[in-house]
Structures are given as C-alpha cells and as structure tokens.
Amino acid sequence: MSAQTSPAEKGLNPGLLCQESYTCSGTDEAVFECDECCSLQCLRCEEELHRQERLRNHERIRLKAGHVPYCDPCKGPSGHSPGVKQRAVVRCQTCKINLCLECQKRTHSGGNKRRHPITVYHVTKVQELLEEEGMDEETKRKKMTEKVVSFLLVDENEEIQVTNEEDFIRKLDCKPDQHLKVVSIFGNTGDGKSHTLNHTFFYGREVFKTSPAQESCTVGVWAAYDPVHKVAVIDTEGLLGATVNLSQRTRLLLKVLAISDLVIYRTHADRLHNDLFKFLGDASEAYLKHFTKELKATTARCGLDVPLSTLGPAVIIFHETVHTQLLGSDHPSEVPEKLIQDRFRKLGRFPEAFSSIHYKGTRTYNPPTDFSGLRRALEQQLENNTTRSPRHPGVIFKALKALSDRFSGEIPDDQMAHSSFFPDEYFTCSSLCLSCGAGCKNSMNHGKEGVPHEAKSRCRYSHQYDNRVFTCKACYERGNEVSVVPKTAASTDSPWMGLAKYAWSGYVIECPNCGVVYRSRQYWFGNQDPVDTVVRTEIVHVWPGTDGFLKDNNNAAQRLLDGMNFMAQSVSELSLGPTKAVTSWLTDQIAPAYWRPNSQILSCNKCATSFKDNDTKHHCRACGEGFCDSCSSKTRPVPERGWGPAPVRVCDNCYEARNSQLDVTEAQGDDEGGTLIARKVGEAVQNTLGAVVTAIDIPLGLVKDAARPAYWVPDHEILHCHSCRKEFSVKLSKHHCRACGQGFCDECSHDRRAVPSRGWDHPVRVCFNCNKKPGDL
C-alpha cells in the first residue's frame, strides 16, 4: 500500500486483522489488543506470544465491535502530548505502530517512511470516538439514554405482557449476564411519577408517557432500562384513581414492590398525608405475611444463586412542596427519618419489611422541579449492596412470574376491605367451606402444587354434606390414623359374593390393617353403632369442587347394574330364555361348594330324564346333585350342611336316608359356610329374578341415572370424550371412569384397575389418566 494514499481515498476498513503475524502470518481477525505489545492480536498469536515469561503479565483487552486503537506515540512519555491519548487513524505496517493524524504527519511525512505501507482505520468510527472523548460526563450519560424506550410489563388485569425470560431481556435491551437492580415508583395519581422518572434517570426524555389530561396516562406497569445506573426502572399506576378492578390493581403494586430493590414514594402534597404511611405499613405487613415465603420458594425452585427475600426494598419518600416547609425544617435537631418513624407508630403501622426508609424533600418556588437531590440519594442507595445485591434480569423475571402465578385471579367485590390497602383477601384462597362458611387460609392457587384447602377454625356437621370422616379406633390407639369408609363388600369378596353378603348382613367397615371390623346387620338385633365401638369420627370441611364425603355403599346400585350388563351378555351368548339363563347363571355364582354346577347337569341324577332348555333343575341340599322336580319334591332339615333346622329340598334317596348322618369334613364345612350365605340370599330373590331379568331388556339408559354414583358426571352432560374430545353418537358409547367419574370413549378407558377409595375393590374401568397415577386410587 502506497504512503501517498490518503485516508479519505482509502475508504473504510472491512475489519481488523492481526498485527503481529507471529503465528497466523497476519491473516486472522484481531481479537485482543495488548497495550504493552502495541498491537492487535488474533487468538493464536495472543496465546503463543504471552506464553513467554517476559510477556506473560502484559495488559490485554478483548476487542469490541468497531474498535479503534490508540495512537502508540501518544501513549509513551516521548509523545507530543504527555498524558493525552489520541485515537489512531492509520497503522504503519513496517514500523508496526498505530498513528493519529498529527503523529503521522510528524513522523511519516518525509524520507523513506513516506513509502511505508499503511492500514487505514474506520474514519467514521474514529470521528465518533474523538467526539465522545471531547464530551463531559453529563453529555455522555445523555447520549447513552437516547435510545431507551419503555414497554408494558404487566397490564391492568395482572397479565404479564412478555412471553418468557428471553423476551423480557430483549425488550429491556440489556445483556443477559448484566447485573442490575430494580427501582420502582409509587404514589397517588397525578403526582407526577412518570415525570419524576423521566428527569431522574433519562434527563428529561419522555421514556414514560406523561399527559396533562385528567385521565391517568399510566395503566398497568411499564418498564425501561437505564444503562447509566444499570437499573430496571418501573413505572406504576397511581393510587386513588378512578379505575375498575381496584383490588387487583392494588395487589399488582405489591408484586412490583416485592421485586424492587429501591422504591420511590412520590408525593406532591404540601403535608405528608396518612395514606402514605398506611400504604407503606400495610405493604410491609403483606410482604412479610404472603410474599417472603413465596420468594424463598422461588429461590429454591429455580435454583437461583441470589436470594430474593433477605429483606424488602429500601424506600425513599420524595416530597415536593410549594407553600410549606420540608419535613424537619422546623425541628433542626431531629432528622426527618425519625419524624417519619414516629408517624408510623402513631398510626399503628410498622414498616419492618423495608431495609431502610429515607426522606428526600425539595421545595419548588419556581418550576421546574429540582431532581438532583433525589438522583444523588438514589445513586447512594444503589451503591449499597449490603442487603440487596444486583442480579441478572432473568432472576427478576422469574420472581415476577412466580408471584403472578401464585397471586392471581379475580377478587370478589364482597371481599374488598377498606381498612387496609392490602387485606388478606387479596392474597389468600377465596374458597369457602360449604358446611360452616370458613375461608381457606392458604395462598391463592395453592391447588396447583397439590396443597389441599385448610381453615383456621373447626368445622360443624352438616346433614346435607354428611361431612364425617371415620378413622379406625384400634389403629388410632396404636399411634396411626387410618381413614375407613362404610363399604358394600370386603375387598376379599368377589363382586357377586359381596353383594349377596351386603343384602344379608349389611355394609361393612374394613380397615387396611385390621381387616373387616364391623358389619351393620351382623346380628338379628342389638347391633351397635360403629362410632361407639370400632371407629372415631372427625368433622371436616367441605370445599367447592371436591367429591364430598359420599359413602361407599352408594355404589351398590351401580355394581348391580354392572352385573346386569354381564348377565345380559351371558344370555345373548347362550341364546337361552332370559329367566332360565339368568337363574342358572346366578345359581352357579352363589352355589355352595358341594353343589354340582348347572352346566354339568344334563339329566336327572335319579330317573336320568334329559333336561331341556326350559326345564327347571333342582339341587338336593344334602348331596348337591341335580334332579328333576318329581325326584326332589320332599323336604327335611339338613343342619349338617349349614341349612339350620328349617326343612329344605332334598332328593328322594337323601330323604329316605334321613336317619343317617352325612359325613361332612370340617374343612368342607368351613368352605361351605361362606358360600351358604350367598345361596340363602339367592333362595330369597329367585322368585323375583324374572322381574330383574325383564329390566335387562329395557334400555339401560333409563335406569343408569338412578344407579349413578353421585361423583359421576350425568350422561346428558357428557357430549365429548373427556380425553380425545370425540363427539359421542349412537355408534360411540359413553363410559364412566370409576376413579374420576368423567365420561370417556372405550379407547380412552379400556384399562381395568381397583379403585378402593371409591369402593371398587376389584378391577373396574378407569381412564388412562387415572391409570397412570401411582399408588392406590
């Protein structure tokens, strides 16, 4: 490159190359500038050069976009202007030095050096840097804030308007690894909060909108990034404004306060009103009561290195007066902060959550307002990292998101409390017990974390909700609290055996540890109430949306309906007359162990007459074989088989041998004892079985609602599958999950699993969502 080529003729330099040529031959892009080597260096050259012992401690900086190095002759003591560094405009490739315009003229304008090849730096960038170096500090700060704009962070409905952490950082226009603090402002509407932020942080630029109109110009929460002080500045909606959703907007202010490091309370009143002290006092109490715990949980849940809730923010009360003196002016011996604490105590408010409270006043005799004192107070507080340290913008977003998720939702008008700015109703669950009317004491949206409702007071019994819970008394005395419910059948009984026992001896109470501890009709008379003998009772709250306290025996009708479905299927498969087929099926289900099954009885055991489809088969209660009516028309007591002293049907042979005792083993007797109860029930209902079977021919939809457990969604309300959303039709049947009670198609509910909590001790239909749940249903 010729020395006669002027910088203007050279044009713009496309990029900075390595000036060392030690490893890369000068072809790689420059990444570092070494002040002591006086050169720009690529990665390879920088690494190889500074491995040497004499160069190891050189000061090196990583280059940024548009970097222009300083002039080398100006750096040293021999330079023309000691102590003043000038930006280089060219680099001499032969001398390997950077030269400003004056040094180039002085050292390379004559002799052989005129012919040295040079590299020209970016002219426009050099001019900008030279202009910037000529600015004072105030002008530089103004220039840094020229492009700052604000954005809506949270709207008036408490909805966050940024989609995620990356979107928040992009709108804030700061680096993801930048450590920053949060400064927010509060005050009454019309007191000039936005105007204060614009003049304190952005040198009067309207970053936050202001308006002379009567309507509030700030709706929701707006944010902007101040690159000078490295803070996220948040503007809030004014208090005491004419607005809808007042409760939600007031709650929103506390969320902003909770994520702030420094809070400005702006007041334009000539005297400090009680509203200021009540707001800060109530905010402190609500912060400690509701937000500290949630912020700590967010710290643990998100794995944040910076604690979010060691202490609340610092507060600066910025008080502007026109006609009155500033606080403390008439008491020179007392500092304003002490007078403020006295006012808090007189009002019964204690701002314990705030790390500090400071007062900064200014009296405006003639506009404009002087914000310099507030700016100095802010800078002093921002430099104090003893209680609140700077953190990444992602941490700030996570904290705000956690608080918004936890404390959200509408606040009913009847819960608005005017005695406090931040009543508990703004932050606690709004559910009320249906039985006693007590409110839930947990935080809002606690159900998302699987935390159940809780109340501070005990509940009262309501017959409507039957809100009694039984616990096993024997287990309680051993130190365990095990809940039990009345059940149609024990878990060890088969479905039909359980129904038979239920009809004969009533419902049972079964403990997982102690087994069956109670039967409601165990004796013919004198049965005691279980509360007096085997269980303890507790009255519990009934919360909206829960299943209540339905007893298990409410499922008995649905169990019978399920059995009828199975019987009807058996009838259609066997192609038999309904009455005979059902009677035969039921007889085999509840027959004593020594009876021959109906399916194996093809002819009378005595006369050998073959049975036709409609012929009645009779079992001899003594020997258990099958006979026709004429060969088993006699009766006599068969106590040895457990039939008691009453006469029962026997065959002719057993009747004639009535004087001889049957040889029944003890084991057989024990086995028959259980099934005999079921058979006795069968004897009692056989005469009405024809009516039951007739009901099978009636569409089951007519009787389903009568047998439906209370937690099932009624059929007429089920229009789509709860899982796949397929619309039900004549071809697509509805099925209820026995666990959750919702309606599903067959594909989404083909799994079978026991649901003991609902009283289904044997495998029944459940949806695939309930089937995925671990443990017992």
Image (cartoon, rainbow, N blue to C red):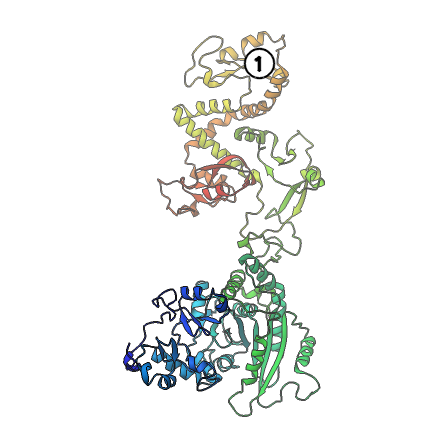
**As rendered, which of 727 and 31 lies closer to the eye?**
31
Q: Which residue is located at x 68 percent, y 73 percent?
A: 348
Question: The N terminus is located in which quarter?
Answer: bottom left
**Percent position of residue 765, x then y:** 47, 38
**Farthest residue, direction bottom:** 366
In the rendered image of this protein, does residue 204 appear above or below residue 55? below
Residue that numbered label 1 is attached to: 622
Q: Type of residue at label 1?
A: Ala
Left or right of 230 in this view: 720: left
**Percent position of residue 139, x then y:** 46, 84
Residue 142 shows up from this direction: no
Question: The C terminus is located in which quarter?
Answer: top right
* SS assignment at label 1: loop
Residue 768 shows up from this direction: yes
**Percent position of residue 87, x then y:** 40, 81
Left or right of 49 in this view: 15: left
Answer few, some or many: residues within 10 Å of disc 1's Cα (few below 14, many 20 plus, some between 14 and 19): many
**Farthest residue, direction front:** 112
**Percent position of residue 124, x then y:** 35, 80
Which picture quadrant has residue 721?
top left
